Image: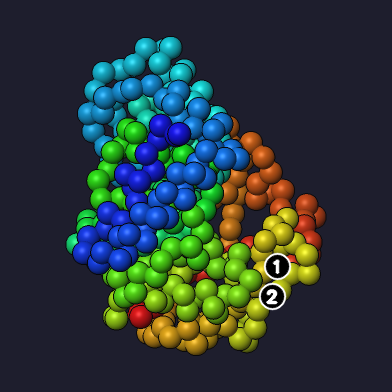
Amino acid sequence: MTTLDASKWSLSKLPQLDAAMVMALRQLDEEVSAELCRGLGPELLAAYLQLPPLEISQVQLTEAVTAEWRTPPSIEVETQLRDALMKLAPWRKGPFQLGELFLDAEWRSDLKWQRLESHLPALEGKRVLDVGCGNGYYLYRMANLGADWVAGIDPFLRYFFQFAALQKYLAVERLSFMPVAFQRIPVLENYFDVLFCLGVLYHQRSPLDFLGQLRRFVRANGTVVIETLTIEGEGSVALFPRDRYAKMRNCYFLPTARCLLHWLERAGFRDMRVVDETPTTIQEQRATDWMTFESFSDFLDPDDPTRTIEGYPAPRRTSIIASA
């Protein structure tokens, strides 16, 4: 039996759910608890349990999501904290600052948020869902904008344990996180005011079906924020890599911005607008002490950085905001 109670962040705690939905989500909680005990679960749990108890004086949910200690810990405790967090690596999203410890993740996720924030609808008092939330970096940024409740879904156990480690110290209320695939979540029909899906769509074998599933979770006149890999071009076309794209085997469709707009329209969204188109750079994605494997520079043609290692156009990311 795991000593980490995943149900404390269950979607079943969302407000104003009917009894049948609460029961279905609690059943999913039981499945998740069993899954935490398999595969990498025990190893990640052991790392989580090594985290030292530290009292927080202040939390800041800004560029580097930060927890400040009430009393400076000893060198031994700081080392214990770093070692435990390192065992949860690789850290893909960040940055985070825990006391004097700067957790420099592979992605400067604050840069993406900076590009999006001025275009977002007001989140104050809203119910927000982040599909493919990673370790929860964006959940904290959404909570900082006054959301009434922020829920995250991501199937990777490592990200869940990273979130649990952060919450041990940040202890931000009204956050939910379920480490399951989005398709396993019972449909919360017309429930969320704002839905984010950042860096997920290009992993879907059927992007149009996936967008249709997302729409069901958003209330009428709600907002969806989609960010995905795209290619340049004026036509309504998409690149389908033959085998891999930027060394990713699970990368399927990379549309033009116009094609992505058409997908959203066909999925039932309206009032779509492109709010950002940005090429990925080594300043935003790179290897660090907290993610020591291959990163962005390794995915490009060494003789032509405008192409991937496979010869496709180099990654660029497009963000679109639409209404349900």
Quarter residue 20 falls in:
bottom left
Neighbours of disc 2 within 10 Å: few (<14), some (14-19), many (20+): some
Badge 1 is on which residue? 313
- Element marked by disc 2: strand
Q: Amino acid at mark 2?
A: Leu
Return the residue nearer the eye: 185 or 103. 185
Residue holding disc 2: 239
**Residue positioned 31% across, 37% down in the render:** 170
The N terminus: image quadrant: top left
Callout 1: few (<14), some (14-19), or many (20+) C-alpha neighbours within 10 Å? some
- Residue type at mark 1: give it: Pro
Q: Tell me if label 1 and label 2 are in contact, CB under 8 Å.
A: yes
Which residue is at a point 38% across and 21% down the rendered structure image? 52
Is residue 248 visible to the viewer in this orientation of the structure?
yes
User: Measured from the top left, where is residue 239 in percent x and y?
Assistant: 69, 75
Kindly identify the residue that appears in the image at 65 percent across and 46 percent down.
295
Could you tell whether 66 is left or right of 50 in the image?
A: left
Q: Position of residue 21 (x, y in %)?
A: 32, 65
As rendered, which of 1 and 284 lies closer to the eye?
A: 1
Q: How is the image coloured?
A: rainbow
In the rendered image, residue 212, in percent from the top left (x then y), is placed at 47, 79
Where 76 falls versus 84 (above or below)?
A: above
- Front-lying residue, 246 or 37: 37
